[in-house]
Image (cartoon, grey):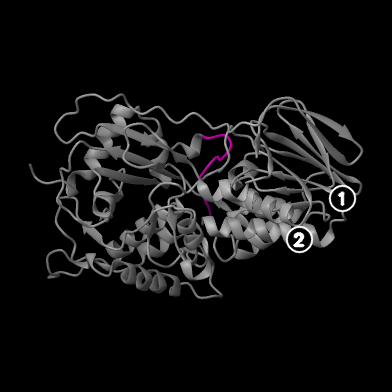
Amino acid sequence: MTLSRRTLLIGGTGLSVLLVSACTRDTDPPPAPTPDAEPGRGRPRAILRSEWATDGFAQGSTSYLPVGATPEDRVALARPVADRLFIAGEATSTTAANTVHGARAEGERAAAEVLRVAQEGERIVVIGAGVAGAAAARRLTEAGASVVVIEARGRVGGRVRTIEAEGWPMPVELGAHWVRDVQESSLLEDLVALGVEIGIADQRSVRGAGGEPIAEATGVDDAVARILAAVSAQTEASAPDLPLASALAQLAPLPEGAPPGALSDRESAALAVGELGARLGAPARRLSTRYGISEQAPGTDNLVLGGYARIVDELLDGVDVLLSSAATGVDWGDEGMRVRLATGESLAADRAVLTVPLGVLQGGGIEFEPPLPLAHRVAIASLGVGRLETVWLRFDEVTWSDEAALWALADPEGTATITHWVNLHAVTGDAVLVGLIAADRVTPFLRLDDDEAVTECLASLQPFFDAE
């Protein structure tokens, strides 16, 4: 149950809520698509794109391990604080970081930790209505706890954002849109049970800047795994960790007399790093060679074709959610907790589950009193926040003949703005292309207006479009 504006009454360590308006389903307004206009030959009819890097309630997309960080930093961040504050999200997962199913599992983990120490009748505040917060709230509610979820946005879902936009043939996913590592999670089955359509994007096309097919296009996933393993093996356990970019520079260039279309180890590794960037949003100059490259979720690319937000709606069904209420401070101590809101109100509770994105914690969006323990502060500072954006283009007609669902541009010099695309025509039959902008390319792209962004997209797409 999603609740709109409330008056909050504080009493002791409890939390009481007086409803002053009817239940509503509030949502953020969708990004304004470019008006339908007569496009030029090959230009899209409409564009929709994400802006996670500049979103104050996200401040980035996913987490990753930069040089100097280890999986232990995720473990440290997940440790309960005085059995009052419990932190969860994809950034605390050591087995499925930067994934939806990892966030869900961490929310359930935090809820179980709360239930081990909570007494009957205690009040629990869950901060954040993304996947982790929704999973924690569901688990706590089913156990009989008194739970309220507070969410800074006017909608639930966090970095899962499904847009129902007029004129588009399907719901547009501007946040998470993949389900991977299905052997370790029931997420795929759960989405299907909710009626969410899933497509399998298992054919890949790799091209050079001139549109020439790259010989290694088949079996590129296996090639990526082999290359990354070889790069990782160059740094022995006793040696200092290296940025992935430094490790790539040690690989051999293409030998003379190599066949046309062949890639050197260095170029192949650059292509592999592009794959990582499209999943983690991490620049090769910061990503840890020893630990960062191992966090790529394995498995077939299962593409959510609209409706990812249903998993959050299902988890929050029947749970009290207070929207448009950003947490600005968390005070914790032996006697309980108080969560301060940007509205000037506050919530008193016995315990809290904190599920805001890592970028918000790094940006100081929430003040803690007393400060978080040193181990938590070190972990927050050590982890990296990935920058990954999505741009959707809707065309009147298909102006390409490449039938692969996944397109990758071999760009060893790093000059292209977008090197990875999803060709939805191969999956759904609709003339829609989805581009993934990662790491250092994000900021320049976000500065473009929609018309400039379309022009930039078409330049990146040129190797995949037909010559005419």
| 270 versus 157 height, above or below | below
Which residue does the numbered mark 1 point to in the structure image? 121
Quarter of the image where the N terminus is located: top right
Query: At 14% from the left edge and 56% from the top edge, which residue is drawn?
Result: 212
From the viewer's side, name the closer residue of 314 and 345. 314
SS assignment at label 1: loop
Place residue 178 in its image quadrant.
bottom left
- Going by the numbered disc 1, the residue's amino acid type is Gly
| 363 versus 119 height, above or below | above
Quarter of the image where the C terminus is located: top left
Is the residue marked by circle 1 packed among few (<14), some (14-19), or many (20+) residues within 10 Å? few
Which residue does the numbered mark 2 point to in the structure image? 113
From the viewer's side, name the closer residue of 291 and 17. 17
Q: Residue 22 placed where, x, y %?
A: 67, 28
From the viewer's side, name the closer residue of 210 and 171. 171
Q: Is residue 8 visible?
A: yes
Per the picture, the main secondary structure of the magenta-coloured stretch is: loop
From the viewer's side, name the closer residue of 407 and 9. 9
Q: Residue 358 placed where, x, y %?
A: 60, 47
Query: At 59% from the left edge and 56% from the top edge, which residue is drawn?
Result: 104
Question: For this view, does 451 lie left or right of residue 189?
Answer: left
| N-terminal-most mark, 2 or 1 | 2
Is the residue marked by circle 2 packed among few (<14), some (14-19), or many (20+) residues within 10 Å? some
SS assignment at label 2: helix
